[in-house]
Image: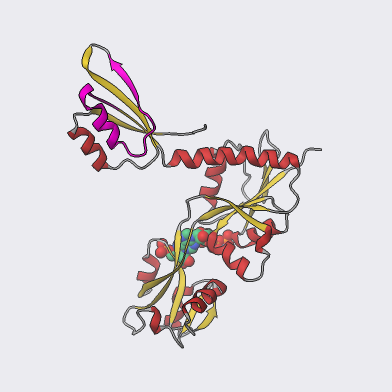
């Protein structure tokens, strides 16, 4: 009987859309019935499980799921709470759901730096990450654990400051809070169980990872095409960011101009396009790359 590889993804929330998009881009075709807690991938022995993000670390450590996609913040907190981190292996950093765990205080108060934290009450949903951070900094503060709505804690008198995830900063501003210290940076991780991997599953995982790598690589990679004077080839090649050896092609009906095509593995900013233009480049096109391999 074929063994099924199970992947735990967030059912609904800030990780859900990007997790499913990544799996789809990696060629996993599935139809998700609204409300269904799992679904089979067409043509591959893979099943997706839709769960709360907080359950992903334990599902993967116990081997109920072979892989999971969760935030570094949730995974670290689980590990520090005594969850067996040895049973979890980070296989890829996925680059989405980026946020920062920050310490913030009321904007008109007198707590504005780490050295002001001794003896204060800090509300957070990440008590163990915060405890470790405070220990490392030799700060003695009281930690108040809250499951959510942490930003309201100072206004309710539950705590003096908070330690919570920040992405745009809008929630802090809306609650009259100002952040002043970073506890950790987080992004989505693909984690793997270390419990019993049959050879069949290992082969499937290697195939899946190659595709995921292709998707991740294509996200930061662009294909650039331009026409330029023959005399500017060297200068232009030197400007192209992270380019492999470019392809130089003749241009029909022109003896002094050529076309340059290159795969650039770094972001191409407007500044670069302006520099290229200053070297005589014309008809510059920057194209997204959908998939990469090899
Ligand atoms: O229901 P379930 O338990 O699965 O979801 P959840 O409500 O616990 O988590 P969810 O979907 O909100 O977040 C999932 C993961 O996304 C988190 O564990 C982080 O890894 C990541 N992430 C990225 C964030 C944020 N950005 C974020 N901004 N998680 C939470 N927030 C919250 C933050 O707590 C604060 O309340 O958004 C608010 C701040 O946002 P800004 O944009 O105003 O700064
Ligand atoms: Zn959650």
Q: Front-most of 134 and 50?
A: 134
Q: In terms of image quadrants, where is residue 227? A: top left
Q: Is residue 187 visible to us here?
A: yes
Tell me how many marks there are. Answer: 0
Q: In terms of image quadrants, where is residue 208? A: top right
Residue 56, placed above or below residue 284: below
How did the renderer colour the structure?
A: secondary structure
Q: Residue at x 35, y 28 (%)?
A: 246
Looking at the picture, how far across and down is residue 232, in whole percent? 22, 27
Q: Front-most of 162 and 115?
A: 115
Residue positioned most to the bottom: 119
Q: Is residue 229 magenta?
A: yes
Q: Is residue 30 visible to us here?
A: no
Q: Residue at x 74, y 47 (%)?
A: 197
Residue positioned most to the front: 234
Q: Residue at x 68, y 56 (%)?
A: 60
In magenta, the rendered stretch is: 226-251
Residue 45, placed above or below residue 61: above
Q: Front-most of 57 and 198?
A: 198
Q: In terms of image quadrants, where is residue 89? A: bottom right
Looking at the picture, how far across and down is residue 267, in whole percent? 35, 42
Quarter of the image that includes the N terminus: top right
**Left/right of residue 79 with respect to residue 175 in the rendered view:** right
Residue positioned most to the top: 253
Q: Residue at x 52, y 78 (%)?
A: 135
**Left/right of residue 107 with respect to residue 193 in the rendered view:** left
Q: Is residue 151 magenta?
A: no
Residue 72, placed above or below residue 131: above
């Amino acid at each position: 009987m074929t063994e099924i590889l199970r992947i735990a993804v967030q059912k609904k929330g800030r990780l859900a859309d990007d997790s499913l998009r990544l799996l789809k881009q990696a060629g996993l075709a599935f139809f998700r019935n609204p409300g269904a807690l799992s679904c089979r991938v067409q043509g591959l022995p893979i099943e997706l499980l839709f769960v709360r993000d907080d359950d992903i670390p334990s599902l993967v450590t116990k081997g109920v799921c072979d892989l999971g996609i969760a935030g570094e913040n949730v995974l670290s907190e689980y590990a520090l709470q005594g969850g067996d981190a040895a049973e979890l292996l980070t296989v890829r950093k996925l680059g989405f759901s980026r946020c920062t765990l920050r310490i913030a205080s009321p904007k008109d108060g007198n707590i504005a730096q780490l050295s002001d934290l001794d003896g204060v009450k800090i509300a957070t949903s990440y008590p163990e990450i915060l405890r470790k951070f405070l220990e490392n900094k030799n700060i003695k503060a009281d930690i108040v654990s809250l499951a959510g709505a942490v930003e309201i804690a100072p206004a309710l008198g539950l705590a003096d400051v908070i330690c919570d995830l920040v992405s745009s900063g809008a929630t802090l501003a809306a609650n009259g809070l100002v952040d002043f210290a970073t506890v950790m940076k987080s992004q989505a991780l693909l984690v793997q169980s270390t419990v019993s991997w049959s050879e069949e599953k290992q082969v499937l995982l290697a195939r899946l990872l190659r595709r995921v790598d292709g998707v991740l690589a294509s996200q930061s990679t662009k294909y650039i095409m331009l026409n330029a004077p023959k005399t500017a080839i060297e200068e232009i090649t030197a400007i192209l960011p992270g380019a492999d050896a470019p392809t130089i092609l003749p241009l029909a009906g022109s003896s002094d101009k050529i076309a340059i095509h290159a795969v650039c593995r770094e972001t191409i900013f407007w500044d670069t396009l302006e520099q290229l233009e200053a070297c005589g480049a014309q008809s510059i096109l920057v194209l997204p790359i959908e998939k990469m391999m090899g």
